Image (cartoon, rainbow, N blue to C red):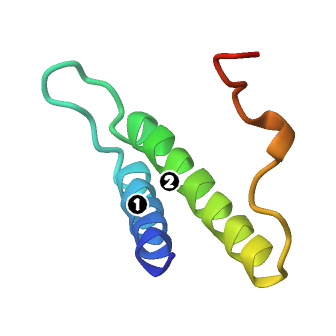
Amino acid sequence: MFFCGFLAWSMAYFTWRSFASDQTSVSSGTLVWIPQFFVTFGIVLLMIQFVARFFQAALGLPLEDISMRAGSVAE
């Protein structure tokens, strides 16, 4: 969880610096912060899931829904 949090913070900072300095791709002229934003967004979502899973485990809540399991071959 610590590593994912550090990665999320680092990518957010990296994306912000690219946005603030108006960096563009050499080959296509695309603003670099646009694809970086989507990567950062995905990492932040992953971090939120890790935190939610941690609190589920810490509070003793069930970590999975038994009714969502795949059925056996015999069913």
Q: Position of residue 14 (x, y in %)?
A: 36, 61
Count numbered badges in the picture: 2
Please determine whether, in this image, residue 11 is positioned above or below residue 56.
above
Residue 15 lies left or right of residue 75; in this view the side is: left
Residue nearest the observer in this picture, 50 or 40:
50
Task: Using residue 38 as the reference point, say whether residue 51 is left or right of it.
Answer: right
Q: Where does the image place residue 34, in percent across and percent down from the top left? A: 44, 35
For the residue pair 47 and 16, the one nearer the viewer reads as 47
The residue indicated by pointer 1 is 11
SS assignment at label 1? helix
Distance Cα–Cα, label 1 vs label 2: 8 Å
Discs 1, 2 touching: Cβ within 8 Å: yes
Mark 2 falls on what kind of element?
Answer: helix
Quarter containing the C terminus: top right
Image height check: is 58 above or below 65?
Answer: below
The answer to which of 5 and 51 lies nearer the viewer is 51
The answer to which image quadrant residue 33 occupies is top left
Picture coordinates of residue 59 (x, y %)? 84, 82
**Three-letter amino acid code of the residue under disc 1:** Met
Which tag, 1 or 2, sits closer to the chain's start? 1
Residue found at the far left of this picture: 27
Residue carrying label 2 = 43
